[in-house]
Image (spheres, grey):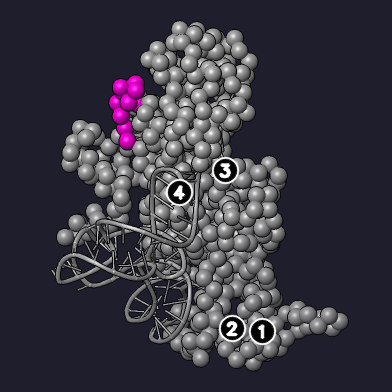
Amino acid sequence: MEEELKNNERPLNFINEIIEDDLKTNKYEGRVHTRFPPEPNGYLHIGHAKSICLNFGLAQQYKGKTNLRFDDTNPTKEDVEYVDSIKEDVRWLGFDWEDRMFYASDYFGQLYDWAIQLVKKGLAYVDDSTPDEIRAYRGTLTEPGKDNPYRNRSIEENLDLFVRMKNGEFADGSKTLRAKIDMASPNLNMRDPIMYRILKAEHHRTGNDWCIYPMYDWAHGLCDSIEGITHSICTLEFENHRPLYDWFIEKLEIYHPQQIEFARLNLSYTVMSKRKLLQLVNEKKVEAWDDPRMPTISGLRRRGYTPESIRNFAERIGVARRDNTIDVALLENCVREDLNKKALRVMAILRPLKVVITNYPEGQSEELEAINNPEDASMGVRNVTFTRELYIEQDDFMENPPSKFFRLTPGKEVRLRYAYIVKCESVIKDDTTGEIKEVHCTFDPETKSGSEKSNRKVKGTIHWVSASAAKEIEVRLYDRLFSVEDPASEKEGDWKDSINPHSLEVLSAKVEPHLVDARPGEHFQFERLGYFNVDKDSTKEKPVFNRTVALRDSWAKIEKKSN
RNA sequence: UGCCGGGUCGUCUAAUGGUAGGACAGCGGCCUUUGGAGCCGUAUGCGGAGGUUCGAAUCCUCCCCUGGCAGCCA
């Protein structure tokens, strides 16, 4: 029963239903074979993560396979840098394409032969129209298109012209190969779609072997067919292309996979378009593709998101055909949930306020035991150094507190976590500015944490570090990159106006000394401040931490309740 | 509105002719000297109008709202 529950944990979606029907009717001899087909023209983002988890996840569910295929049919936009980053990101997310990494360009020869076949069947023709003419003859959304004069060339002439196109006899853009379907089709994609264009561009893999490149519609379904894909899962905007996907395969009489569309991921306060993300990088609005504010997989990784948290997110958002905008709070919840189990707790002070324990002897210090992770005893304990001079968070002290403030205030007591109860005796201010320079406290030696007499209750527990033992690190706090909920809907050209100018704040924090030895990628929870991740560029000499996500701010709640 | 889609709590997502459920967000409470953690509780929803049916989120009709498509991009 429990086992059954476990198997059912993964929520089923409409694609599961399709697959299970196909399995029942033995449509593909019981096979499930998916593919993840990115174009290497940018870095992968969280939206791709949804697709990756879907494609690989479905295959895992049904003991099938998933190919990684680079849809590299447009050499002008593509680059090996992107290929490499995509491979890294898919692996990092925890998926394995085994020996099945392919490129659409692997099939250029086959695609060409098939195009010849279509020409011979009278189903494709060479068109000399200019782009403007093509557009004009295509008609509009409400009016049918018209046949152009080239449409009726003979098979022999088309064959001759197409071969010469391939051989490089014609200039870029001067001719195209088009499928001969129906210029009056209500579906614009069926109005004699272009199959090949002339592009004398160097391809990142095939170099200058080709000067004609296949269009997406011509290439994609055929690649799926070649690879024996059973379920070709793509996003909704390709829905209108499905008739064309099917048409090519039917005319060629080859193995027929089925295209299934789902709604792409939209995240609140997030821009997801690759084109826009590229602009942010090119215009230096962010540091790079892996800037921790970017919704890219590499950005999330650098920010401190874990693969588990992203996979869990992908599962929780579900898969459907309706447009959606997921609240970023759900993503943040997923990473908190995961990091809560994994991250070591440490004490750190972002905005220091000096505290002097006046009845603690100068020069004395002691080591107090602190728990590394209260949820997991196996993560052990560490020592923290207690001294006469300490730093606490500025927020944790108020000279004139509101009625429900339960941290440190003049004349009141508070517990220093893992240490003693202290009482604020006086506030030292700068004579001229009136700024609070330090706070003087006395401690009660009987209240040492863990000791028998430590049971006295105080309303607040605050964190601290020893002034003399603490080390300094750089911390980077991130806020959302966009200040509006739906930046994508901002008018074209205006969307950058909604960039949040305060999305990055750099501070120098005082932390427990062992933190300077942390390795890039390690996760910590800074007590009460958030989850932090050691940046990839961090060194022992200059430690740099990124805040993955803040903890929920529930002080107000706690204080209210304690009243 | 030419064609193709989509409308279930604030946001996602289940239930496919038989008690509208879950998650996140919200609100309330409990617990806690080391959990900004955890636990418990709670409100809010089937776009609308008809119809079929003992029974409709589910089937039918009409209406309303909404997304995509006119690259030699993918």
Tell me if mark 2 has few (under 14), some (14-19) or many (20+) residues whose alpha carbon lies within 10 angstroms of its own: many
Query: Is there one chain holding both mark 1 and mark 3?
Result: yes
Of A67 and B52, nearer the camera is: B52
Who comes first in sequence, dot 3 or dot 2? 3
Who comes first in sequence, dot 1 or dot 4? 4
> Mark 2 highlights which residue?
A407
Contact (CB < 8 A) between labels 4 and 2?
no
In the image, residue A352 sits, relative to residue A265, either above or below, namely below
What secondary structure is found at the residue carrying circle 4?
A: loop
Quadrant location of the N terminus of chain A in the rendered image:
bottom left
> Mark 1 highlights which residue?
A398
Which label number is shown at residue A264?
4
Q: Amino acid at mark 1?
A: Met
What secondary structure is found at the residue carrying circle 2?
A: loop
In the image, residue A376 sits, relative to residue A137, either above or below, namely below
Query: How far apart are the two marked residues, 1 and 4, measured between alpha carbons?
Result: 47 Å
> Mark 3 highlights which residue?
A274
The x, y position of residue B20, in whole percent, is 28, 71
| Left or right of residue A363, residue A10 in this image | left
The x, y position of residue A283, in whole percent, is 71, 44
Which quadrant of the structure image shows residue A422?
bottom right
Q: Is residue A250 magenta?
A: yes
Q: Amino acid at mark 4?
A: Arg
Query: How far apart are the two marked residues, 3 and 4, measured between alpha carbons?
Result: 13 Å
In the image, residue A538 sits, relative to residue A423, either above or below, namely above
Query: Is there one chain holding both mark 2 and mark 1?
Result: yes
Q: Residue at x 51, y 41 (%)?
A: A142
